[in-house]
Amino acid sequence: MILQLKGVLTPAELASIHHELRRAEWHAGRESAGAQAALIKNNEQLSHDSVAMIAIRQRVLAALDRHPEFFAATLPRRVFPPRVNRYGGESNFFGDHVDNAIRFAPDTGLRVRTDISCTLFLADPSDYEGGELIFRESNMERQVKLPAGDAILYPGTTVHRVAPVTSGFRIACFFWIESMVRENDRRQLLFELDRSIVRLRDAYGDNEHSVALTGTYHNLLRQWCDT
Ligand code: NI
């Protein structure tokens, strides 16, 4: 399931993040890449413990916490501390790859299995040319370029790349989620069931059928989740 989350960040939060970014220092992204990725990864990142990165990370995690679809779609067990990257100038692309299955957070030693990848766009599409996030699905490709403040969730198993940025700068926050429900298909089924229950309750209020369906959701979750 590839899912767009709209309006994760408010305009005020975006403005404050861009204020932080003005004092940020950028470093070559391939410093944190594995041997294979280093050959195809050409971008810049904020260091994980910089003042700007810590401030931005707090804002992003708080925003994810209150987003109604983030929890339902990911059923998070652990979230890798969000990082920020930038594509533009000489450092402007990331070729086809699958993200490493396990990420180790610096300092804390936190291990996160990357069931779900997330990119939260911080630059508006009008700020740069190119820079599409492109997913390869069997014999077709799917391109994504979202408004600032929107995020895309996609399975960690997906082959993807970032197309070269030919002008301006593409700035985004990226991180991974280890889910309480490891299998993509089960997580998608639970998400679709959850959304349908929410819509039924909005339309008709609670009744014995919505209570029964909610029970089915939780009984499935109990079977499939690891906490
Ligand atoms: Ni990636």
Image (cartoon, helix red, strand yellow):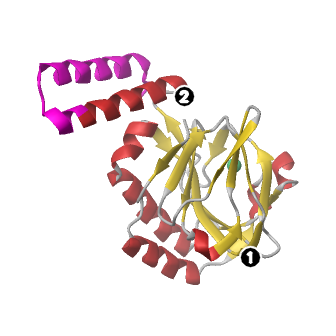
Left or right: where does residue 39 sit relative to residue 203? Answer: right
Mark 1 — residue?
A: 167
Quick one: label 2 or label 1, which is nearer the N terminus? 1
Mark 2 — residue?
A: 184
Q: Is residue 165 visible?
A: yes
Q: Main secondary structure of the magenta part?
A: helix
The segment highlighted magenta reads 200-227
Q: Nearer the viewer, residue 13 or 212?
A: 212
Vertical order, 105 against 198 (above or below): below
Vertical order, 101 against 29 (above or below): above
Residue 222 on the magenta segment: yes
Residue drawn at x 31%, y 22% as measured from the top left: 217
Residue drawn at x 85%, y 46% as measured from the top left: 36
Q: Nearer the viewer, residue 38 or 167?
A: 167
Residue drawn at x 38%, y 44% as measured from the top left: 69
Q: Nearer the viewer, residue 214 or 195?
A: 195
> Please, what is the three-letter code of the amino acid marked with disc 1?
Ser
Residue drawn at x 38%, y 38% as measured from the top left: 72
Residue 208 on the magenta segment: yes
Q: Position of residue 14 (x, y in %)?
A: 45, 72
